[in-house]
Image (cartoon, rainbow, N blue to C red):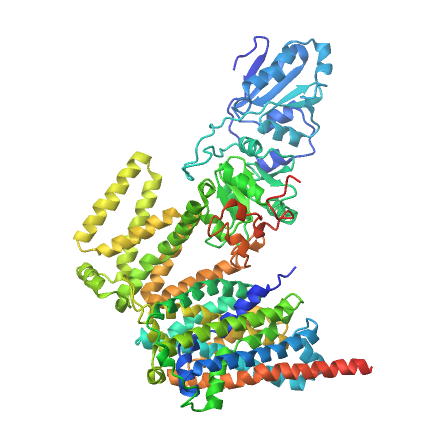
């Protein structure tokens, strides 16, 4: 930043001394003074402190949190063009917010505002413009057709992306804060008249009750506020896609944005919602519906394929038709392990490959895929460690798990699969049935923001099935989802 | 506010309590006890059940949303109430426990001859416990999900359209029937489960749709039984049907796909879901009754104790025939409860109403 010649400039030098966070940040009785402020930010070398001696003015701010243009326009320019007797008049302008509480002052500086000290008076000027990346495509939720912009780590930018799409004064934004140290802003967005306010009150209550030093991501935040923190299933859906968030808002759901996270959460959510993708709506309804059905088929495959292999090859050989029996028996003849160990070994290998691929840069990740998928797979079969058929079963269930659009849900289901494989190894088909029964019992008891997680299967609502298991034509989807308990149940008739 | 049971859920809950593993032997029971074209008697059974539900509806109407326990306790002294509750709890617990054992025994006979049945029973009981402690609202939610996982199997009957022979049905009706009364009671016990609607009064919305839902649940059961039995009567000859222990399992064993055959294993596994709801509903009913006697007892502990007792009792019968004999007698007792309890409640309600008018 260009520095004016008539302005003294200094920053605080390092002087490492232990400081009690709770006492320095939580004092609220101390009047806002320059000394107290500088004392609070002791050892913060990034803090900028400037003085204008001829005006008896001092300013304090974090350079990397402010916008240079805004700072020059709203602070430097006015201060360099006035005389001392004009200062009092200048600070009457609306951009100078008088501050009487030291806690508010500290908070303002941390939020990228410039603190101005003039004799005993203190003002804050909002020139905040924290550095952030530009709006890009989401890497975790890619789609083929449809809008490609996605949320970034700056909450205000994310809100602007939503406002750009919902040009309505009914779109309301509440601001809350989480993290005793990090003090992250959380914005709760909803459309007044479409949302059930009981849900909003419940969500706000839960966020206000969070007591933790830091929350780093939206996916982390929802674990503090969901109904069953010990469940394996994600109870609030998260998205990085702006169009998905807007569609949830219009459906009467609530959208929550955590500053510093591109993952925006929506509530209440249903188990079946995790199998929908925004581009289902951008394609012809028959295609969209086929894709939805394919995803549920993928769920069945990913859960049961390997488990069925284990069950059939361990207990139920009679289920294999004669023509297939020879192939399977031949394929298994060289394998020295029981099917359960063989399957667990391969599933574990696949999970290792997936995790390695996810952690490595894209180019090396591809190599891992080739090495793991082709080389290890081929070698394992040739060495007699595993059968060809199992490789097909494991690979099919792995691919099927990637068909599920939500990464969090897909990961949960992959873990559950291990349980089913073990049950199949112990009790065959009955073991799989016991496993599925346990999953259904668990799911039936879950709620998302107090509403049933299994909606629209139970409580049953057939109308919702048209936008859950299939993607019906738009004329057939006139109602908002029953789970949102919206006071305005119909999507149509809004022009009247 | 406590969530109420929706009529749709009541229908499916009743259906899921009613249907169980007995469906696999029902066509044989019909052939043995009712003779040629015995499946037609299912219409009569459905009618009798509807009559029984009508009795329940009268109780429901007069009870004004009160639970049956409140009705009984208001009218009778504890000396009568406690033995009555003891009988109800015993029958319901035993039914729940033996239905589970029967399912496990059949599975063991087909697939796991060397696995100890009580190990499988233990796993099923753990599932039942986990569901019971969630309360009736979640039980009904689980029943709805289980319903969708099971009901599609009815479509498999389409495989037998081609091999269905009308000539197997013969023009004779009820020839060679044996034991029309006691055999009839055994068949009627396959419809049991609807009587637990008596315990749902406090959990449903106060309107007529509740009773309608119970009727719909029963009709769904009737349709399932009739379709399955008719298919068996048309597929097998009468003599074949009489000689098979579980004709429906044998029927399913005929189905062949290019990639899988003998799907009876999978289908029978899926019937764990209906069996589970039957077990859960009866043990839940027993738990509710015990809760009236010990109102301060922790619900989870109570459920755990009843499931534990049921598990212990299930050690006694060693073979499937013994279990089926126990179930037969318990079925007779439960039929007595299904008709007797609503009649008894009606008498109490009418007397107390008459008493009030008199005052």
Question: Looking at the picture, does residue A128 appear above or below residue B345?
Answer: above
Q: Is residue B2 above or below residue B110?
A: above
Give the quadrant of residue A124.
top right
Q: Nearer the viewer, residue A253 or B221?
A: B221
Q: Which residue is pictured at 47% across the width and 64% down the height?
A: B146
The image quadrant where one finds the C terminus of chain A is top right
Where residue A196 appears, as percent x and y from the top left, is 63, 48
Q: Position of residue B289 (x, y in %)?
A: 60, 76
Residue B320 is at least partly visible in this image: yes
Residue A255: x %, y % from top left: 56, 41
Q: Is residue A106 above or below residue A226?
A: above
**Near-viewer residue (A466 or A17):** A466
Image point (33%, 50%), residue name: A398
Total marks shown come to 0
Q: Nearer the viewer, residue A226 or A400?
A: A400
Residue sitting at x 54%, y 43%: A248
Residue at 68% from the left image edge and 71% from the top image edge: B65
Let me know if residue B135 appears in the view: no
Q: Is residue B145 left or right of residue B110?
A: right
Closer to us: A42 or B149: B149
Q: Position of residue B96 (x, y in %)?
A: 49, 77
């Amino acid at each position: 930043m260009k520095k004016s010649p008539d302005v003294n400039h200094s920053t605080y030098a390092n002087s490492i001394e232990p400081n009690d966070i709770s006492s320095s940040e939580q004092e609220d009785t101390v009047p806002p003074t320059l000394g107290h402020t500088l004392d609070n930010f002791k050892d913060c070398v990034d803090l900028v402190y400037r003085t204008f001696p001829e005006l008896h003015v001092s300013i304090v701010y974090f350079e990397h949190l402010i916008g240079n243009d805004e700072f020059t326009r709203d602070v430097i320019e006015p201060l360099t063009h006035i005389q001392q007797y004009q200062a009092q008049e200048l600070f009457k302008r609306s951009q100078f917010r008088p501050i009487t509480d030291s806690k508010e002052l500290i908070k303002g500086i941390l939020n990228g505002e410039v603190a101005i000290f003039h004799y005993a008076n203190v003002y804050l000027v909002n020139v905040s413009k924290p550095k952030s990346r530009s709006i890009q495509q989401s890497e975790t939720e890619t789609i083929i057709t449809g809008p490609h912009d996605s949320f970034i780590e700056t909450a205000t930018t994310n809100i602007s992306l939503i406002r750009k799409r919902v040009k309505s004064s009914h779109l309301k934004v509440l601001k809350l804060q989480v993290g005793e140290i990090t003090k992250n802003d959380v914005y709760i967005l909803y459309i007044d008249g479409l949302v059930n306010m009981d849900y909003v009150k419940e969500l706000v209550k839960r966020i206000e009750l969070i007591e933790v030093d830091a929350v780093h991501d939206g996916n982390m935040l929802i674990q503090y506020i969901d109904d069953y923190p010990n469940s394996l299933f994600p109870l609030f859906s998260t998205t990085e896609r702006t169009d998905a968030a807007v569609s949830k808002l219009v459906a009467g759901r609530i959208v929550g944005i955590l500053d510093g996270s591109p993952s925006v959460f929506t509530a209440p959510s249903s188990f079946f919602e995790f199998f929908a993708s925004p581009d289902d709506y951008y394609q012809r309804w028959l295609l969209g519906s086929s894709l939805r059905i394919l995803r549920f088929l993928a769920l069945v495959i990913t859960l049961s394929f390997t488990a069925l292999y284990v069950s059939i090859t361990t207990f139920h050989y009679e289920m294999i038709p004669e023509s297939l029996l020879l192939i399977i028996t031949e394929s298994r003849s060289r394998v020295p392990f029981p099917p359960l160990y063989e399957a667990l070994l391969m599933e574990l290998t696949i999970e290792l490959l997936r995790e390695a691929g996810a952690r490595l840069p894209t180019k090396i990740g591809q190599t891992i895929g080739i090495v793991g998928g082709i080389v290890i797979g081929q070698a394992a079969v040739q060495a007699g460690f595993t059968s060809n058929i199992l490789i097909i079963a494991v690979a099919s269930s792995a691919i099927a798990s990637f068909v599920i659009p939500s990464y969090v849900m897909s990961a949960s289901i992959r873990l559950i699969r291990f349980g089913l494989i073990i049950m199949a190894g112990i009790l065959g088909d009955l073991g799989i049935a016991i496993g599925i029964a346990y999953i259904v019992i668990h799911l039936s008891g879950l709620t998302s923001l107090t509403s049933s997680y299994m909606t629209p299967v139970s409580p049953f609502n057939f109308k919702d099935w048209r936008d859950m298991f299939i993607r019906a034509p738009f004329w057939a989807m006139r109602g908002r989802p029953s789970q949102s308990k919206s006071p305005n149940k119909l999507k149509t008739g809004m022009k009247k | 506010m406590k969530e109420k049971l929706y009529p749709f859920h009541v229908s499916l809950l009743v259906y899921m309590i009613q249907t169980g593993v007995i469906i696999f032997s029902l066509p044989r029971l019909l052939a043995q006890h009712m003779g040629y074209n015995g499946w037609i008697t299912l219409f009569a059974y459905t009618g009798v059940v509807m009559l029984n539900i009508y009795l329940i509806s009268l109780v429901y109407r007069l009870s004004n949303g009160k639970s049956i326990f409140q009705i009984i306790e208001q009218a009778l002294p504890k000396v009568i109430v406690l033995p009555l509750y003891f009988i109800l709890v015993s029958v319901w617990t035993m039914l729940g426990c033996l239905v589970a054992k029967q399912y496990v025994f059949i599975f063991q006979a087909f697939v796991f001859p060397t696995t100890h049945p009580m190990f499988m029973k233990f796993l099923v009981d753990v599932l039942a416990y986990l569901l019971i402690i969630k309360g009736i609202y979640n039980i009904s939610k689980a029943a709805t999900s289980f319903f969708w996982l099971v009901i599609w199997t009815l479509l498999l009957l389409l495989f037998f359209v081609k091999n269905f022979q009308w000539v197997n049905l013969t023009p004779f009706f009820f020839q060679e029937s044996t034991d029309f009364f006691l055999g009839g009671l055994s068949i009627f016990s396959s419809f049991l489960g609807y009587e637990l609607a008596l315990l749902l009064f406090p959990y449903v919305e106060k309107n007529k749709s509740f009773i309608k839902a119970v009727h719909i649940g029963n009709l769904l059961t009737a349709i399932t039984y009739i379709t399955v039995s008719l298919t068996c009567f048309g597929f097998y000859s009468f003599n074949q049907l009489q000689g098979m222990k579980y004709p429906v399992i044998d029927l399913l064993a005929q189905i062949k796909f290019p990639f899988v055959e003998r799907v009876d294993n999978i289908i029978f596994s899926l019937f764990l879901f209906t069996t589970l709801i039957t077990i859960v509903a009866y043990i839940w009913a027993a738990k509710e009754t015990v809760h009236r006697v010990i109102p301060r007892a922790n619900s989870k502990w109570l459920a755990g104790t009843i499931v534990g007792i049921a598990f212990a009792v299930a050690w006694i019968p060693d073979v499937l025939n013994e279990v089926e004999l126990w179930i037969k007698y318990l079925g007779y007792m439960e039929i007595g409860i299904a008709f007797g309890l609503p009649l008894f409640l009606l008498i109490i309600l009418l007397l107390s109403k008459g008493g009030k008018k008199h005052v």
